[in-house]
Amino acid sequence: MSELNIAMVEKYRNSFLHEVEANVEEGDWVKMCMQCGVCSGSCPLGSHWEHSPQKLFMMIRAGKREEVLSSDSMWMCTSCYNCVVRCPREVPITHIMHGLASYAKRLGLVPKGQQTAKFAQHFWDNLVKKGRVNELKLGLNLYFMNGFAEGVKTSLKMKDIGLGMLKTKRMSPMEIFGGHKVKDLDGFQAMVKKAQEIETARIEKNMNA
Amino acid sequence: MTEVIATNQTILVVGGGVSGMTAALEAAEMGKKVVLVEKRAFIGGRITQLYKYFPKLCHPTCGLEINQRRAKMNPNLTILTLAQVTDLTGSEGNYSAKVTISPRYVNENCTACGDCAKAVDAEFDNEFNYGLGAMKKRKGAYLPYNMAHPQTYVLDPAMIGTEDAEKAKAACKYNAIDLEMQEEVLELNIGAVIWATGWRPYDAAKIQPYGYDRIANVITSVEFERMMDASGPTGGKLIRPSDGKEAKDVAFIQCAGSRDRNHLKHCSRICCMASLKQSTYVSEQFADSGKSTIYYIDIRAIDRFEDFYKKVQANKNVSFVKSKVANIIEDKATGNPILRGVDTEGYHRYEQPHDLVVLAIGMEPSLNEAGFPGEVVINEHGFIERDESNGAIFAAGCAADALDVNRAVQSATAASLRAIQVVNRVAGAEG
């Protein structure tokens, strides 16, 4: 258990809903859920999740902290927004899913080897480096995410698509050297750093309050 | 020319549904002069299109007949049909209303013999049946429905100037058809106004995932109601629009358009009881081989309605699924709509075919459509709010809130009393 996690368990004790409201992005919407289930039924990947959004919201209210934060369901959200457009109460379900995932990561509760979490980290690292996604490097990172042998295998499987993209100039091989970036890279990175500081300060303040 | 005598001691009632009719009759029977303005060609409103009332399961035609008789007998009441209030100005005790009357092309000589209808060929969508079923169409010369009051035929304005109109005129033995009839505009001086313009079903096609506009066997609760009418579009049979097969396995979807920030924010209040009631239609028609399934968020059967809910729950042919259906797809081979979703009691994912789906459609105030011709306070849901600044304009029934018939009548009686007080004050002041 991370130190932050221990502190948060101590702080919120029996009120996991309050913890979510304070610390999770859009978490204060969770109480608005009326358990109609339209989100779960609308999720295109719904049958592959252990906990549908509706179920997660009920678990939050029931104080099932460990089960929620170590669930891998919110990591499965593809941001299709089907649930958000159909929710009769306009609950920003997609954002809450990402908020829960992000909070679980902060607390060190992401299930080991969770593939989407792993990829999300690669994506983030790739993005903050230049302020632009380097698709060539991101693709290679993804292929080799689970070891060299699997990487080679996936690369061979995908080679036609890769070559096709090169041919139609949808991807440049030069991206391997540095790659394109935003105009004001220093400014961009300072902005990200500041945002992270604000977010961390907010959570720490909640912890100590 | 239509002659209407009105003074500032007259009450104007706008809308001739159950609320407007009640308000008008209560005031007229108190000796007040009342002018009732109705947009359609007949009075009675949406209750004329219902099979049964909840919770007593009695027929609306019964009370309607009593009210129509009260209306016919009362000399204080003037009824204007095919009429709309197009302008309203003034203040308490002294309003001026502009009433626009569309031509009916049939005068009071009409005996409702129906010869004109037989003579014409032109057909139009039958709004009385919401365009449903085999009797989707009505003739260009028509009586809106059997019990229509007044019992006077109407000529569809789209037919005027065609050969059919001449045929209708030639067929009439009573010289009742007047093709020269023009729109009339009356200026009425009145003391108080009761606004009872009622409601209309929410546009089901806007609830995209339910496929009302794409799937033949997805219909609305108001259409389902028409199917039970022996003289209705299906001759009183519960059948599927796609193939005419008996609809023995019916799904009801609650909150179709209501309690939903994407549609109507308010709870329409009638739909839970309406679906519970309609499940008894399925049992009435098919006994034990008829099955109803009600998909709901929560059943709102308040106070004395709880007994009715309990009774329906006890019927083994009615089942309840606590879930807002996510979407509906059509099984092309059978025409069955397939309902998909996850239930809240156990989070079971379902994909359930039914013969027919009935959307318990929400209640939208008719005010939303045309707006209000004068100044009143209208809330975010489109209903008229009770407010001092409304002066002597009183909302009754579904112009005031989403109400069932019982509560609409209570609301109408209350509005009527308020209006009576106003005209009494006017009378008192004038000695």
Image: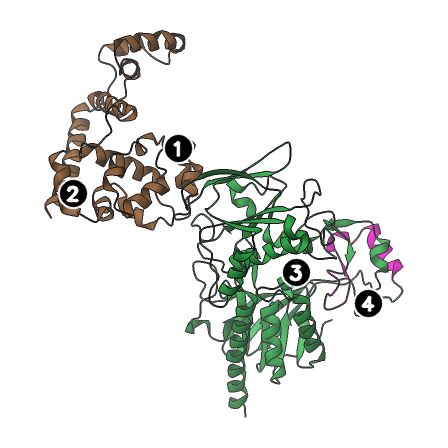
Chain colours: A brown, B green
Discs 3/2, front:
2
The residue labelled by disc 2 is A9
Quadrant of the snapshot with the C terminus of chain B: bottom right
Tell me the chain of label 1.
Answer: A
Is label 3 on the same chain as label 2?
Answer: no
Discs 4 and 2 lie in a common subunit = no
Amino acid at circle 4: Cys
Q: Is residue B422 above or below residue B357?
A: below
Name the secondary structure under disc 1. Answer: loop
Q: Nearer the viewer, residue B341 or B119?
A: B341
Judged left or right of residue A23, residue B119 is right
Of circles 3 and 4, the one toward us is: 3
Q: Amino acid at mark 2?
A: Val
Q: Nearer the viewer, residue A101 or A9?
A: A9
- Which amino acid type corresponds to the residue marked 3 in the rendered image? Tyr
Q: Residue at x 68, y 40 (%)?
A: B242
Numbered circle sitting on residue B51: 3
Q: Compute the Cα span from label 4 to label 1.
A: 62 Å
CA–CA distance in space, label 3 to label 4: 28 Å
Sequence-wise first label, 2 or 1: 2
Residue indicated by mark 4: B110
On the question of residue B198 being in view, the answer is yes
Q: Are marks 4 and 1 on the same chain?
A: no
Q: Which mark is on residue A80?
A: 1
